[in-house]
Image: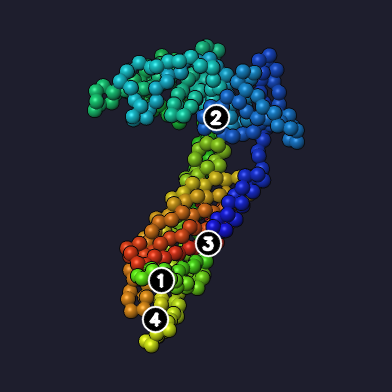
Amino acid sequence: MKKIGLLTGLVSACFFNAQIRFEKGYFVNNSGQRSEVFIKNLDWKNNPTEFEFRTDETSDVKKENIKNIREFGVGHELKYVRKTVIVDQSVEILDKISDKKDPEFKEETVFLKYLVEGKANLFYYEKGDMKKFFFNIDDSQVVPLIFKSYYLNSSQISYNEDYKKLLGKSLNCNLDQNRIEKIQYQANDLSKAFMGYNECTHTGTAVNYNQVSEKRDLFNLNVRPGVNFSSFETVLSSYYGGSDEVTKFNRETAFRIGVEAEFVLPFNKNKWAIFTEPTFQYYKAEKESVVYPGQSFEMKSTRTVDYKSIEIPFGVRHYFFINDKSKIFVNLAYIFDFNLKSEIKYDYQILEISSGNNMAFGIGYKYNDRFSAEFRAATNRNLLQNYNTFTSRYQTMSLILGYTLF
């Protein structure tokens, strides 16, 4: 518990000391006044209703909201504009799909995110499970692109794809019906269609904000060698109410090797990721014990443990950016363990290892998105689950180095 407490303290320190990134941006207020500021770029998953900013890199943090701001942007990556639009409230979650074909509109004032800016503008709005696209041409009213799943009956789903009809009427430049039918209700497909229209009409340079997001590195494959510092003990329960017999094996250091697949989530500035890391690990130790102490047939016995396994953790990771090349991360993972012909020799019997699963917590550092080092501590794991009189405690701390292949 002390180790977990220490790790928790380190994680808390990361939260308080990790640098908050304010990036060059701007906003336009209700009077039309434009202010060049530094905006806290959260790379919002859900469209925001407010944001924090500084007037310069060292000033106090201030906050603005949708009531006072009609437009704001961060660098060349994000741009939002305030619009009052009708939003279809239906979602594409299986157990929430309705039996109505028509959209369920509600008027809302929201910040719409630009995906494409030009003669024809494409906007995106996300809130919880709701993901919608909007557009306008020149200075016309912003209207929704309609896509909705609905039940025809209890077992059959159909689709309202009115957005294709609207694209056919509005983007009528080098976009035939065959191409329209292939356009999916997705950011990539729609962005390409709008960029194609803007290029076809020769009305100046269009900006594809979605292309910036596409360039992000959202998958990493990492080689992760390291060392484990492991301890192990067995406990034999007494039949007659006496003291349990505890055998504590020595703490051992052993090599471990893993290959990690990391999937970076495409929001919040790539700060969140999920990962899995199949890992080979082993522990081997022996302990000389006295059997039947104090009795006439007292004798010495060498007890041994030979434990090899493949661990497969599934976890979540959060990054704290220090600067453009350095970042700290913390992990939380649930580990599934599969032993490989492992056993414990206990006096005159051989105990078969049947491993349980456990949790692990880690803190680490990554440099230049290539090199990493992590300290990880795991909770106790019982290797003798199939026994009533025996139990065990296996615990590991690890020092892990990493290299990102791609």
- Residue at image point 39% right, 16% down: 104
- Percent x, y of residue 379: 48, 57
Mark 3 surroundings within 10 Å by alpha-carbon count, few (fewer than 14), some (14 through 19), many (20 or more): many
User: Which residue is outermost to the bottom?
Assistant: 296
Say if mark 2 contacts mark 1, CB within 8 Å.
Answer: no
Q: What label sits on residue 209 in the rendered view? A: 2
The residue beneath circle 1 is 242
Which of the two marks, 3 or 2, is nearer to us in this view?
3
9 is higher (above) or lower (below) than 54: below
Measure how far apart labels 3 and 4 are at the Cα level. 37 Å
Label 1 Cα neighbours within 10 Å, binned few <14 / some 14-19 / many ≥20: few
- SS type, badge 1: loop
Distance between the alpha carbons at the discs numbered 1 and 3:
36 Å
Residues tagged 1 and 3 counted as in contact (Cβ below 8 A): no
First reached walking from the N terminus: tag 3 or tag 4? 4
Q: Earlier in the sequence, mark 2 or mark 1?
A: 2
Q: Name the residue under label 3.
A: 398
Answer with the quarter of the image where residue 373 lies: bottom right
